[in-house]
Image (tube, helix red, strand yellow):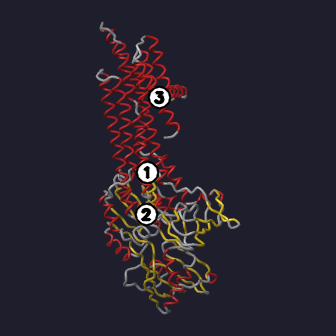
């Protein structure tokens, strides 16, 4: 409990003690009014101040105004105990609400407690702790066992295991050695590390993740926007309704020759004001989404706003890029079939042409070659998206790519019998053979597709630039519904466009990719989900939802968390409106008094907030 909450708690205790004491003091008239004004002022001065400021700034109809009018009206009618009690219990509800919101924020902060407090710099043989913001790119920092990695970089000395659970939600540690890239937010579990920084702290992974989570509350869901609009019209309507209830029945009674009974109807009007306070909805709905986003964060699922969390529940089409999403994206050369040249020469030509690329296929060719590459021999490198790469090596024009590339060059090629990713090589227009590269399907990819179906997804689609035979084999193994192969980046966008036209108006389409090569498709889909984004700035920037590890089952889990959050939201809306509308009707006919009104306001708010905090309990039963 923070200082502000403790101060409110103290005021509540003092006001409650004074109310109980004055209840047994046998005084009447003005003296009784003066006595009860003391606890009323102790507990309600800030509410009255906010109400006055709201009127001055033109924001009249809010909960502070309702409480001020209702309690001042009760005092004017001699209902001193009721007026003070309404303000007391309203403050109890506000305190509870503040504590619940604070607890939720603290839980999320704890779950995302990845911001390092310092970085170790070695000077004159001693370690000096500095602010991570002050560390320049290219500096050598030291990370001791048990410390967080403060800034993204490359290990230059030391081996260790890294705990990435704060980023991915998974407790399995990762091995790290010299040459490996490490990202901020990981915890060094064992060895002493020396890391050369590759980014400034504000550009590091941990900084971008924290910024993402902090800004998530700015993008509101339809439910939150509805409640905001609802409260905007609901509160004034209730105020005018209460005014009509206080004036019209007495006037009608007078016209009919009956006693006006002003006090009876004014009390009923004040009771409806207390009942009508929309706190339960205005607070519990955002709190539910906040809890859902926090619960997802703990599982390594970063949602950029409650609007995206809400849209997840309506996702009926999931379109996946193959490489890195359903497959590991770790390629290795499995066969080399030359034509007119040796295997060594074929592999050498392919490795040299691909020497400037960081694509997984390029890396696998360079790894298989296993020798130093003299890049000075390579010139006129041209990468043709969706086809391959060409370059000049020792005066020869070398082409390395897929079958579409060979067709474009009008080069006759050999069709492999084995199903794998094909890399064909041509030299000065003459076919030189092909290299087969295999990409391993993720162990849980098939299970992930099954979970998506159980989560209510109608169709799982796989898009890839791979050859049809390879793509169909992977699709069949994973039981995906539709496989589209040999696609250029523009073709992927076109396929997504077709699906967007076919789906229902309320149905959502999510595209799952690596967030780097698939940025156009990620932005075109209803929901862009970046898979395996650990350390990928582009993924965090491009997608609406970021999965920090490469587990495709997290997609179904994200949908599950979304549906649970929305259930809680709808429960609160229905519960709060039903109780309030019921009590409003009963209050209008005089069946309920001010004490029932307190329950309809504070009691409903407490129950709704308690229900909302369940969204933070992210351990949902996975589909």
Query: Could you tell me if residue 248 is visible in this image?
Result: yes
Q: Is residue 115 left or right of residue 611?
A: right
Query: Could you tell me if residue 521 is visible in this image?
Result: no
Mark 2–mark 1 distance (CA, rounded to whole Å): 20 Å
Q: Position of residue 445 (x, y in %)?
A: 36, 68
533 lies above or below 612: below
Crowdedness near tag 1: few (<14), some (14–19) or many (≥20) residues, C-alpha within 10 Å: many
Mark 2–mark 3 distance (CA, rounded to whole Å): 47 Å
Where disc 1 sits, the SS reads helix
Which quadrant would residue 471 be assigned to in this image? bottom left
Q: Is residue 181 left or right of residue 15?
A: right
Residue picked out by circle 1: 293
Mark 1–mark 3 distance (CA, rounded to whole Å): 29 Å
Q: Position of residue 514 (x, y in %)?
A: 47, 65
Crowdedness near tag 2: few (<14), some (14–19) or many (≥20) residues, C-alpha within 10 Å: few
**555 or 294, which lies in front?**
294
Residue picked out by circle 3: 64
From this viewpoint, which residue is outermost toward the right? 124
Report the quarter where the C terminus lies.
bottom left
Crowdedness near tag 3: few (<14), some (14–19) or many (≥20) residues, C-alpha within 10 Å: many
Q: Position of residue 322 (x, y in %)?
A: 41, 69
Residue picked out by circle 2: 171
Q: Is residue 456 left or right of residue 74?
A: left
Q: Are marks 2 and 3 in contact (CB under 8 Å)?
A: no
Identity of the residue drawn at 37% across and 18% down: 267
Where disc 3 sits, the SS reads helix
Q: Choose the circle earlier in sequence order: 2 or 1.
A: 2
């Amino acid at each position: 409990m923070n200082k502000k909450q403790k101060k409110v708690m103290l005021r509540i205790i003092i006001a409650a003690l004074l109310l109980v004491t004055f209840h047994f003091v046998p005084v009447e008239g003005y003296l009784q009014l003066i006595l009860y004004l003391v606890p009323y002022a102790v507990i309600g001065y800030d509410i009255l101040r906010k109400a006055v400021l709201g009127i001055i700034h033109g924001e009249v109809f809010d909960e502070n105004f309702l409480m001020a009018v209702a309690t001042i009206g009760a005092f004017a009618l001699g209902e001193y105990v009721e007026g003070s009690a309404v303000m007391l219990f309203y403050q109890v509800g506000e305190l509870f609400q503040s504590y619940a919101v604070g607890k939720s924020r603290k839980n999320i902060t704890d779950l995302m407690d990845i911001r390092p407090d310092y970085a170790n710099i070695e000077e004159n043989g001693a370690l000096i702790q500095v602010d991570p913001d002050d560390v320049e790119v290219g500096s050598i920092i030291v990370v001791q066992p048990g410390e967080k990695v403060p800034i993204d970089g490359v290990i230059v000395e030391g081996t260790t295991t890294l705990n990435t659970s704060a980023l991915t939600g998974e407790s399995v540690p990762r091995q790290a050695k010299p040459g490996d890239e490490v990202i901020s937010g990981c915890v060094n579990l064992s060895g002493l590390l020396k890391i050369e920084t590759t980014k400034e702290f504000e550009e590091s992974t941990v900084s971008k993740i924290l910024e993402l989570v902090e800004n998530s509350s700015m993008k509101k869901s339809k439910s939150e926007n509805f409640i905001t609009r609802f409260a905007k019209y609901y509160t004034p309507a209730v105020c005018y309704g209460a005014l009509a209830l206080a004036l019209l029945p007495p006037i009608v009674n007078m016209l009919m020759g009956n006693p006006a009974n002003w006090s009876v109807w004014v009390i009923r009007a004040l009771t409806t004001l207390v009942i009508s306070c929309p706190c339960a909805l205005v607070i519990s709905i955002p709190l539910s989404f906040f809890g859902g986003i926090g619960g997802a964060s703990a599982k390594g699922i970063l949602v950029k706003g409650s609007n995206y969390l809400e849209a997840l529940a309506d996702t009926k089409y999931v379109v996946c890029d193959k490489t890195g999403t359903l497959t590991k994206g770790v390629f290795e050369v499995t066969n080399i079939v030359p034509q007119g040249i040796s295997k060594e020469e074929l592999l050498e030509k392919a490795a040299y042409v691909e020497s400037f690329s960081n694509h997984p296929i390029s890396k696998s060719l360079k790894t298989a070659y296993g020798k130093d590459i003299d890049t000075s021999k390579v010139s006129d490198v041209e990468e043709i998206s969706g086809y391959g790469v060409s370059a000049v090596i020792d005066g020869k024009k070398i082409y390395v790519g897929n079958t579409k590339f060979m067709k474009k060059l009008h080069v006759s090629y050999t069709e492999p019998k084995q199903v794998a990713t094909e890399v064909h090589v041509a030299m000065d227009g003459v076919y030189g053979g092909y290299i087969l590269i295999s990409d391993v399907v993720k162990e849980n990819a098939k299970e992930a597709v099954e979970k998506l179906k159980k989560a209510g997804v109608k169709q799982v689609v796989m898009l890839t630039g791979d050859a049809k035979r390879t793509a169909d084999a992977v699709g069949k193994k994973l039981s995906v519904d539709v496989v589209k192969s040999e696609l250029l980046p523009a073709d992927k966008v076109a396929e997504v466009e077709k699906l967007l036209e076919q789906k229902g108006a309320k149905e959502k389409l999510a595209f799952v990719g690596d967030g780097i090569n698939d940025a156009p498709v990620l932005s075109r889909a209803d929901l862009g989900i970046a898979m395996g984004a650990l350390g990928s700035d582009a993924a965090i920037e491009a997608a609406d939802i970021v999965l920090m590890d490469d587990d495709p089952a997290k997609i179904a889990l994200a949908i599950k968390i979304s549906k649970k959050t929305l259930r809680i939201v709808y429960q609160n809306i229905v519960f709060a409106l039903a109780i309030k509308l019921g009590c409003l009707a009963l209050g209008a006919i005089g069946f309920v008094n001010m004490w029932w009104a307190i329950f309809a306001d504070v009691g409903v708010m407490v129950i709704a907030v308690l229900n909302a905090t369940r969204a933070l309990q992210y351990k949902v039963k996975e589909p």
